[in-house]
Amino acid sequence: MSINRMLSWFPLAWRARYEAEVRELFEAHPFTRRERRDLFRACADAWWRETTSWGVGVVRFSAAVAIRIAVVLLLGWMGVRGLEWLVPNDVMRAWWPTVATDQWYAVLIVCKLSVFFVAVRGAMNPYERTLDPARRPTWLQTLGWLGTFSLLVVCDGRPANLPDACSMGIFAMMRWSPWLQLIDHDGRVRTTVLGLR
Amino acid sequence: MAKKLDESLASLGRFSEPAFNILVALADGPKHGYAMTQDIEQMTGTRPGPGTLYGAIARLEERRWIEPLPADDRRRPYKLTSAGQKVLRARIDALRAVTKIAQSRLANA
């Protein structure tokens, strides 16, 4: 596991404060197995210290773990379904009788590939993006994504499209993960609801 | 008072030894993480892991025994505060007392 991946598991407040310094340490000498174990222990310790109460800590840590499990399951699902997930269902013909089928297929496949791309990109390091407000999805991107998602749901014809719904979840997580951790970008505990730009 | 301060260092649990090493490393002036690691390795023969190092730094900062200075690029130096100096002195006094007892017992053995 790379150092970037391991550091992505730390709480946001810890990362905002110490990540650059720890990264610099790892650049100075090779990353040994002992240090890898040390970093895992430090991660658990950072989560424990960061919590204001035991209950809140459990909720936050569970949310962080659950999100990552969901991301792995989603990417696995998409990989297994492959072309079946990518190619739109024939039911769409009934919705768009006047438009050439090939054109709509092309549009939908592009949309689905973009869904997959954003999901993979978000899954690479979701909290990394939230550390820097400039890298978080803007409201315009969020609306564009909602539009894409709606198009997929309406045109695809499959009533329950789990991979699309999960990818939407990942996108939302990228936008709102500071809220999930209840921590602001400067490391203070948040008192407002959503970390909107 | 000295004993109380020494006990407060012990309250850091498994981080008390790395914290002590950090305080010693900072005793002769501000240092950033990598310089502290080098210094501690030179003193003790063991390089502290980055997780342990920053776990101890976070605790020392929280207690205001060390404080960060403005970062130079990505390197942020830390300096010992006067409270940190008191804690370090108390710990050294306690170690000195134990060493003295140990030496006298070995001499009598």
Image (cartoon, coloured by chain):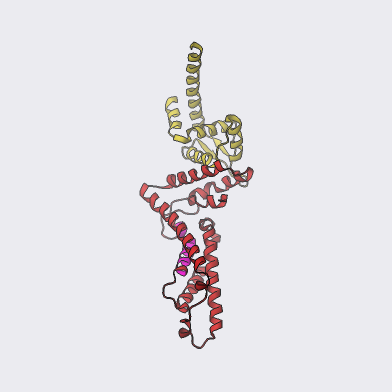
Chain colours: A red, B yellow
Q: What residue is rendered at 41% in x and 53% in y? A: A62
Outermost residue to the top? B108
Image side of residue A187 versus residue A26, left or right:
left
For the stretch drawn in magenta, what is the main secondary structure? helix
Q: Hey, which quadrant is residue A33 in on the image? A: top right
Q: Quadrant of residue B44?
A: top right
Q: Residue at x 51, y 12 (%)?
A: B107
- Nearer to the camera, A33 or A181: A33
A89 or B74: nearer the viewer: A89
Measured as percent of width and height from the top left, residue B9 is found at 46, 32
Q: Picture coordinates of residue A183 (x, y %)?
A: 45, 53
Which residue sits furthest front? A80
- Report the residue at 50% width, 77% height from top: A88
Q: Nearer the viewer, residue B9 or A116?
A: A116
- Number of marks in picture: 0
Q: Nearer the viewer, residue A103 or A10?
A: A103
Q: Farthest residue in the bottom direction?
A: A98
Q: Position of residue A127 (x, y in %)?
A: 51, 56
A17 to A74, vertically: above or below: above
Residue A137 appears in the figure: no
Membership of B24 in magenta stretch = no
Q: Is residue A175 magenta?
A: yes
**Residue A143: image x %, image y %?**
49, 71
Q: Which residues are magenta?
A: A164-178
Residue B88 seen: yes
Q: Is residue A131 above or below residue A165?
A: above
Residue at x 54% of width, y 79% of height = A105
